[in-house]
Amino acid sequence: MAGAAPWRTCGEIWGTSCPQPVKPPDWGHDDPHHPHYVDQLRRLASPGCPAEVLQLFAGANTWELACAIACNPACPPETLGHWAELWDIIPDPAEISSLTGRTWYSGPNEVAQAIAGNPGCPPELLGRLSSSPAMAVRWAAAGNPALPSGAQGGLARDSNSFVREKLAWNRSCSPGLLGQLGADRLLWVRRGAMTNPACPDRVFQVNSRHRYASYRAATASSIWCPAGILETLSSDSELPVRLAVASNSRCPEPALERLAGEPDLRVRARVAGNPGCPARLLGRLGCTTSRRVLHSLAGNPSVQPETLVRLLQHRDLKIADAAANNPALPRHVRAMHQLASGTRQPTS
């Protein structure tokens, strides 16, 4: 089990790509039974919601409205503090040791999660939320770019791997803690640390020498991996590691040259689909007869237009379609191809 946490933020639930909010109608904005209630929640969660509208709803007493407003990046810090006091979402520090996520009912965890994930949350309030007994609240705080450095250490030692992974992805996480997370016992936490641009080189060095190929492949898949380590991993004995190197858009040219000459078609296909592959090497791969390699090449946006024009005429329709949908194909060539194939009728 790896990757994303099994819950979503309030912003993901309500959505943030809604129409421009308007002043709410006089229908009783805190009535959950009103047909426009959910639509209004989406509008309140939208970053474009006017401040006066957010202020109008600040006195509402339903947790749904509190979540929608609290997850809005435009929500004023004083409003977030108001919600924290209204819902009593921060337990007494003396009681935290006796509380768990299942028994903590001093206030809705959903409101606390929305506040903890808001970049405008005051540092003091965010630091207190980072020690919440509710796992989802700590997870939201761990991903907040405004997380104070004093609260990061506790979350880096959190018992839940999703919280540690979320902190590893946080761009404000310190290099020292990334070094700790990059040596975590679980692979997906290490992978999260290696996707962070602040990850120190020693993390890549340690994981590139790991006895398990999955750890070395995770190292090779990071665009922040040093070039020297990628060159070493390009000669790895395990296929998944070499595939990860061949797919890395920042793979150095000597390593791509070596991988492009491999007998395994899967590796050469990854090189052909790499957008960071030099044009000279892509042109050489275009002379192959392997359909797997040509299909990857036809979808590469870095391939030369003349190569795409040639692939448009390929008898394999999958290769021709991939070349036709490539954004590097000149517009006039795409238009002529569409007319010739009958996919678009000429306008009168």
Image: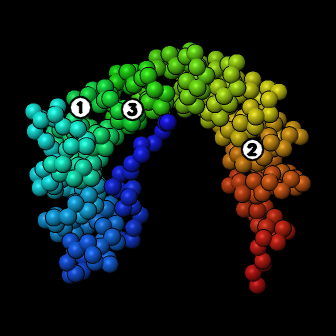
Amino acid type, label 2: Ser
Q: State yes or no: discs 1 and 2 in contact (Cβ < 8 Å).
A: no
Q: Residues within 10 Å of mark 1 (few under 14, many from 20)?
A: some
**Can residue 51 be spotted in the picture?**
no
Q: Residues within 10 Å of mark 3 (few under 14, many from 20)?
A: many
- Among the 4 quarters of the image, the one containing residue 15: bottom left
Q: Determine whether 153 is above or below 336 in the image.
A: above
Measure how far apart labels 3 and 1 are at the Cα level.
17 Å
Sequence-first disc among 3 and 1 = 1
- Among the 4 quarters of the image, the one containing residue 86: bottom left
Mark 3 lies on residue: 161
Question: How far across and how far down the image is residue 207, in percent?
Answer: 52, 19
Q: Determine whether 254 is above or below 163 in the image.
A: above
Q: How is the image coloured?
A: rainbow
Q: Determine whether 128 is above or below 47 in the image.
A: above
Mark 2 lies on residue: 296
Mark 1 lies on residue: 151
